[in-house]
Image (cartoon, helix red, strand yellow):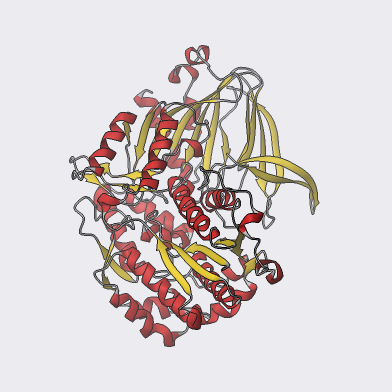
């Protein structure tokens, strides 16, 4: 039996149309279908990371600089920064998001952008159709509006990541169609229960090893190597711990620096916190023991290491039964983040190649530029976008090579224990 | 760091984000940040040593110490504004800009020796955004970044090596290759 294991991003499908993720998911579906037809037992793994807030990830990053500057001035120039911040966050949610978000977790502040792992879908925007169909766009099919709205309505009361996964699966079911029975689709995402985020053995192993390395002073002096891949709740002046859009956590002079994070600098946040490593470990143990208190999520660079480890283990298991091809599809030309997607790419290449063929694709920039910029979801554009998919790959697909009979496991060097 | 220096840095960061001119760093001198005592404990024998001075969600201020002969390799500041004020010694700063619409191609924009008598050196998202620093003598400089590097927001700090000279319209440019860190 020959196997294909395809990995792609599944966030960015439900709330906004200008995302590389839209085209990447369809590319992955296209390849999965082709692989299945070529006789590969095909698995599609969907990354649903707990990183950036839905507000920042999907929407703010596509606003004009002038609009962002206006939001920034409204907060920073205000006599009452806290009130101005609440107003701006509410304005972003009410004018740019197709759904209303909320959270039932007591440690999450409503006046900051939500972390995706705790955001819940409360309702559908009452002016959804106006937001999406305000101006015609060649990729948007208005006849799909009912279907999109029904997906959002079905997501009421579920978590934001559940909605993203549901919309991604809906699009995949359409595209994979007849192959759906033989393409195995499953998500790679954090556990739903916040107390279990750090519980899996592979997660704790990455966290513990890195903290040990950083505390021992063996890390490099560049910016990236000082980052600690956790986002913890940050305390506010009233003694509460707020957990929202990922905070920044990093090594600083032998201690840990925690900062609230504000990607666009519009929230007027100030202040930070320094901890000894021992104190950070104590907070992690408290979390593990189920004590209420500060939440900790996982982010770059730990997320990439955990994902790569998971995919490598799966590929290694498959390789025991036959040859394996691993394909990673993420980003578009010119916009690939060399640190985030780049790290996962480098780790996969390192961990997978001892026992599988590894391929990496992004989308051609010309295709990304054809996407509309507005609230909406993949179902609205997937029919027209699908027509562009076969020619959207960078590098272009070489079917002779990609679908060639994979080398048998015996043709690869035996993986070491560390690689397994 | 004294409240006066903190206030100057905060005002300078706000001015930077608003694209206003900002002479505020000129008011900060070596004594304000504990030089030259810090230089006597310069641990780095080559490269650089960062003393992170003050970090907030919207900017980061650091004091960098470099021994004579030390180099900070060519690196970028994606989407960021920055001010670099030499407080001690002398540093050669070679600056570059990405060429618009050209993947991985950059063009040299300036090459200068900078000392405390010079004003703060400014870089912007589309002006002098990449640079390489070489300490001609034991040196220290204050670095103000607004916003700070943020990997997930597409602002990683990447280092590059000059791979080849390329003939392009308007003169030669340089192909840069990112170096894994």
Give the image location of residue A262, x and y in percent.
38, 48
Can residue A136 be seen here? no
- The x, y position of residue A345, in whole percent, is 56, 53
Report the front residue among A280 and A150.
A280
Q: Would residue B106 be seen by someone viewing this image from the given angle?
A: yes
Q: Residue at x 60, y 17 (%)?
A: B138
Task: Determine whether B38 is above or below A147 in the image.
Answer: above
User: Where does residue A255 sit, x and y in percent of width and height?
Assistant: 37, 28
Return the residue nearer the eye: A121 or A62: A121
Q: Is residue A83 above or below residue A323?
A: above
Looking at the image, residue A38 sits to the left or right of residue A71; the answer is right
The picture quadrant where one finds residue A207 is top left
Q: How many marks?
A: 0
The N terminus of chain A - image quarter: bottom right
Residue that extends furthest to the bottom in the rendered view of this protein: A143
Instruction: Please state the horizontal and vertical placement of residue A54, each as a whole percent of the image.
Output: 37, 61
Would you say B149 lies left or right of A338 here? left
Left or right of A129 on screen, residue B124: right
Q: Residue at x 70, y 66 (%)?
A: A401
């Amino acid at each position: 039996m020959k196997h294909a294991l395809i990995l792609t991003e599944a966030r960015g499908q439900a709330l906004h149309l200008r995302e590389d993720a839209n085209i990447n998911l369809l590319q992955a579906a296209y390849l999965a279908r082709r692989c299945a037809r070529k006789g590969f037992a095909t698995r599609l793994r969907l990354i649903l990371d707990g990183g950036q807030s839905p507000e920042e990830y999907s929407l703010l990053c596509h606003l004009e600089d002038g609009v962002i500057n206006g939001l920034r001035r409204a907060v920073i120039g205000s006599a009452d920064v806290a009130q101005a911040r609440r107003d701006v966050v509410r304005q972003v949610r009410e004018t740019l998001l197709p759904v209303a978000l909320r959270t039932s977790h007591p440690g999450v502040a409503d006046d900051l952008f939500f972390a995706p792992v705790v955001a819940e879908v409360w309702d559908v925007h009452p002016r959804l159709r106006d937001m999406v169909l305000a101006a015609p766009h060649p990729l948007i099919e208005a006849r799909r509006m009912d279907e999109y709205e029904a997906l959002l309505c079905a997501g009421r009361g579920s978590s934001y990541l559940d909605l993203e996964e549901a919309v991604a699966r809906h699009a995949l079911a359409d595209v994979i169609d007849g192959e759906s029975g033989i393409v195995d689709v499953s998500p790679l995402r954090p556990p739903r229960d916040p107390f279990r985020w750090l519980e899996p053995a592979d997660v704790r192993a990455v966290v513990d090893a890195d903290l040990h390395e950083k505390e021992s002073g063996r890390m490099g002096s560049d910016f990236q190597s000082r980052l600690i891949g956790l986002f913890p709740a940050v305390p506010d002046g009233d003694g509460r711990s707020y957990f929202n859009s990922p905070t920044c956590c990093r090594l600083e002079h032998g201690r840990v620096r925690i900062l609230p994070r504000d990607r666009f600098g519009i929230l007027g946040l100030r202040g930070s916190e320094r901890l000894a490593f021992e104190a950070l470990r104590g907070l992690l143990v408290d979390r593990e023991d189920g004590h209420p208190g500060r939440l900790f999520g996982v982010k770059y660079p730990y997320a990439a290491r955990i994902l790569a480890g998971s995919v490598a283990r799966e590929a290694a298991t498959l390789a025991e039964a036959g040859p394996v091809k691993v394909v990673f599809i993420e980003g578009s030309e010119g916009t690939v983040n060399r640190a985030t997607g780049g790290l996962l790419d480098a780790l996969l290449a390192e961990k997978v190649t001892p026992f599988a063929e590894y391929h990496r694709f992004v989308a051609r920039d010309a295709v990304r530029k054809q996407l509309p910029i507005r609230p909406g979801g993949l179902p609205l554009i997937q029919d027209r976008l699908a027509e562009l998919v076969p020619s959207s790959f960078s590098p272009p697909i070489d079917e002779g090579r990609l679908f060639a009979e994979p080398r048998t496991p015996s043709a690869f060097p035996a993986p070491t224990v560390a690689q397994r | 760091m004294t409240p006066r220096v903190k206030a100057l840095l905060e005002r300078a960061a706000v001015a930077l984000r608003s694209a206003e001119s900002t002479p505020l760093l000129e008011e900060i001198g070596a004594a304000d940040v504990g030089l030259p005592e810090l230089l006597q404990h310069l641990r780095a024998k080559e490269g650089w040593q960062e003393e992170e001075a003050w970090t907030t969600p919207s900017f980061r201020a650091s004091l960098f110490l470099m021994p004579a002969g030390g180099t900070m390799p060519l690196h970028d500041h994606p989407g960021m504004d920055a001010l670099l004020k030499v407080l001690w010694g002398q540093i050669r700063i070679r600056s570059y800009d990405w060429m618009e619409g050209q993947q991985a191609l950059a063009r040299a924009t300036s090459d200068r020796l900078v000392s405390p008598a010079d004003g703060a050196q400014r870089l912007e998202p589309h002006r002098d955004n990449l640079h390489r620093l070489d300490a001609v003598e034991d040196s220290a400089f204050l670095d103000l970044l607004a916003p700070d590097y943020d990997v997930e927001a597409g602002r990683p700090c990447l280092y590059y090596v000059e791979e080849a000279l390329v003939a392009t319209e308007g003169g030669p440019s340089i192909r840069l290759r990112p170096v894994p860190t």
